[in-house]
């Protein structure tokens, strides 16, 4: 059953010159009528598709979307990687697009070296790869086109440009790259890169690159995530076992040689020494998985895992047991509805102090699921999904209008008339709870603080409670949410403390920060 949240009925009436009994009857009838609200109308008010040209009017085959503050001015910009017209027998590459946020509106921004770089692009990962204080990007390309690393620079006249730092390794490493996930996997203070190659002809050739002091990328060839991988879709890093380094989960696509392949979970034992753990720590459940996302859905302090599957197979939710193992959870509608879930993303959409879920489905409507606080989800039916978003390939969450709640962007792949060629920006008008945002700057850790764990502690109903977030470049498939972490607080009005566990191993505490604000924290500051 879909959720209907506390709807308010306002009755307007005038008092005619009638006996009191008749007036009471009339009022009673009016109140009875209000007992059955128009749920479709209410849900329309909860999540609203907004028109923000050129973002929502540009026609392209959107491969991936990344919410990113590329210019460092504190608001949420957007980078869209575009692929190619799938209806064309001889597809040509399409230009990627950068949309700069200007007070809650988006303007197309031309930037040398970035928006003039056409490609068969799939996804991107934004981070400060050279630790110089500006965000760079790695772009994954399909159709045997080389991937590319772009570093952001400022020219002598103050203009922004992006410069290719693609080494011979990158230039020669060609595949059918679906997704890119970045993290400091070796804890040396620089963000490394994992690329999933999903083309069936490229199975087993996923790429792992070690970032050498922001100067060059060296391909790592002799570690489990690249030697035992298959034709892969989404991948995502997280310190699931809490030992201080970034582990990796990869969603593998089926091939003729695989009978509905599963997830691959790789435990990082340090210095890029990985052990494959699926079937042992992670139960083999997800069939034909395509997208993955980490999040603490039960607020117990560790990272749980959600996997979106193809071909109508049910999606899967795995509960982290806190001992390095997982158990399959009953996630309610979020694990019982079958579709082709190409992209998934966690975020507290209603600001009620738990992580909710957005699932972008290919060939059907996408879904919003609200968490009851235990990791059990129910669906919100919203008229917003009646729009043409039936070929969704990516989803990202970010507060584009800076009002303290998470909005939703869904990207559509096929550039074909009548088949979902528009990207859809969904404004959140539902959340009314308090919140906190945390923006981190690493010093000993990588500058973007990728992999940092944030714990927000407070008292509610006489009990100490907490929520955990982990800074990541990747969610779902070909998507990236904003690096600034959002935490919903519900009716909580005071935070006891915020604890940051940096990738360097340093722990830092901020006592009683203000709510409904952005908390900026510099490592060691």
Image (cartoon, helix red, strand yellow):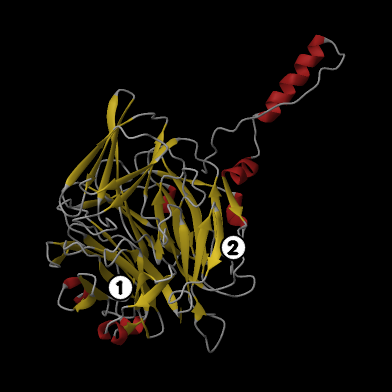
Q: Which residue is mark 1?
A: 195
Residue appearing at x 54%, y 62% in the figure: 364
Question: Does residue 288 show up?
Answer: no
Q: Please tell me the numbered disc located at residue 136.
A: none
Vertical placement of residue 509 versus 60, above or below: above
Badge 2 density bin: few <14, some 14–19, many ≥20, Cα 10 Å? some
Choose between 491 and 224: the one closer to the eye.
491
Q: Nearer the viewer, mark 2 or mark 1?
A: 2
Choose between 342 and 72: the one closer to the eye.
72
Q: Which residue is mark 2?
A: 56
Secondary structure beneath label 2: loop
Going by the image, does 337 lie left or right of 237? right
Q: Earlier in the sequence, mark 2 or mark 1?
A: 2
**Could you tell me how far apart the alpha carbons at marks 2 and 1 are, in whole angstroms?**
28 Å
Residue appearing at x 57%, y 43% in the figure: 46
User: Could you tell me how many numbered marks the image carries?
Assistant: 2
Secondary structure beneath label 1: strand
| Picture coordinates of residue 406, whole percent (x, y) | 46, 48
| Picture coordinates of residue 99, whole percent (x, y) | 51, 64
Question: Does residue 442 show up?
Answer: yes
Residue appearing at x 47%, y 44% in the figure: 405
| Picture coordinates of residue 279, whole percent (x, y) | 20, 62
Q: In the image as oriented, which residue stretches furthest toward the bottom?
A: 90
Q: In the image as oriented, which residue stretches furthest toward the right?
A: 17
Badge 1 density bin: few <14, some 14–19, many ≥20, Cα 10 Å? many
Quarter of the figure with the C terminus? top left
The quadrant holding residue 218 is bottom left
| Picture coordinates of residue 162, whole percent (x, y) | 39, 73
């Amino acid at each position: 059953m879909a959720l209907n949240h506390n709807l308010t009925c306002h009755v307007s009436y005038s008092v005619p010159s009638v006996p009191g009994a008749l007036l009471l009857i009339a009022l009673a009838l009016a109140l009875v009528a209000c007992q059955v609200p128009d749920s479709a109308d209410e849900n329309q008010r909860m999540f609203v598709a907004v028109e923000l040209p050129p973002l929502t009017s540009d026609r392209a085959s959107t491969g991936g979307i990344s919410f990113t503050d590329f210019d460092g001015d504190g608001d949420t910009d957007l980078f869209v990687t575009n692929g190619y017209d799938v209806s064309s027998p001889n597809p040509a590459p399409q230009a990627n697009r950068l949309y700069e946020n200007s007070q809650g509106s988006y303007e197309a921004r031309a930037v040398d070296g970035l928006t003039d770089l056409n490609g068969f692009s799939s996804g991107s990962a934004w981070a400060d790869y050279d630790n110089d204080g500006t965000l760079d990007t790695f772009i994954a390309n399909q159709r045997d086109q080389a991937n590319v690393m772009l570093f952001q620079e400022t020219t002598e006249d103050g203009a922004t440009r992006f410069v290719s730092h693609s080494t011979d390794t990158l230039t020669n490493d060609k595949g059918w790259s679906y997704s890119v996930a970045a993290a400091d996997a070796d804890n040396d203070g620089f963000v490394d890169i994992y690329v999933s190659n999903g083309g069936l002809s490229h199975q087993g050739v996923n790429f792992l690159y070690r970032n050498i002091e922001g100067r060059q990328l060296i391909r790592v060839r002799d570690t489990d995530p690249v030697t035992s991988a298959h034709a892969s879709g989404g991948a995502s890093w997280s310190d699931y076992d809490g030992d201080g380094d970034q582990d990796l989960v990869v969603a593998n696509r089926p091939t003729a040689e695989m009978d509905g392949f599963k997830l691959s979970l790789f435990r990082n034992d340090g210095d890029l020494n990985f052990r494959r753990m699926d079937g042992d720590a992670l139960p083999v459940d997800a069939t034909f998985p395509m997208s993955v996302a980490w999040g603490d859905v039960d607020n117990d302090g560790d990272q749980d895992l959600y996997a979106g599957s193809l071909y109508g197979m049910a999606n899967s939710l795995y509960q982290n047991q806190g001992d390095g193992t997982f158990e399959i959870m009953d996630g309610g509608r979020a694990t019982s509805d079958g579709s082709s879930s190409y992209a998934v993303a966690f975020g507290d959409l209603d600001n009620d102090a738990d992580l909710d879920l957005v699932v972008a489905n290919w060939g059907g409507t996408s879904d919003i699921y609200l968490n009851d606080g235990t990791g059990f989800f129910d669906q919100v039916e919203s008229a917003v999904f009646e729009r043409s978003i039936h070929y969704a390939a990516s989803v990202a969450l970010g507060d584009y209008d800076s009002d303290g709640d998470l909005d939703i962007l869904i990207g559509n792949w096929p550039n074909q008339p009548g088949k979902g060629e528009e990207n859809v920006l969904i404004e959140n008008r539902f959340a009314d709870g308090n919140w906190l945002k945390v923006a981190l700057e690493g010093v000993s850790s990588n500058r973007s603080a990728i992999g940092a764990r944030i714990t927000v502690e407070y008292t509610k109903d006489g009990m100490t409670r907490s929520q955990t977030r982990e800074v990541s470049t990747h969610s779902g498939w070909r998507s990236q949410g904003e690096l600034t972490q959002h935490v919903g607080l519900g009716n909580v009005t005071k935070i006891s403390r915020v604890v940051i566990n940096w990738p360097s191993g340093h722990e830092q505490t901020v006592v009683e920060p203000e709510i409904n604000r952005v908390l900026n924290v510099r490592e060691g500051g």
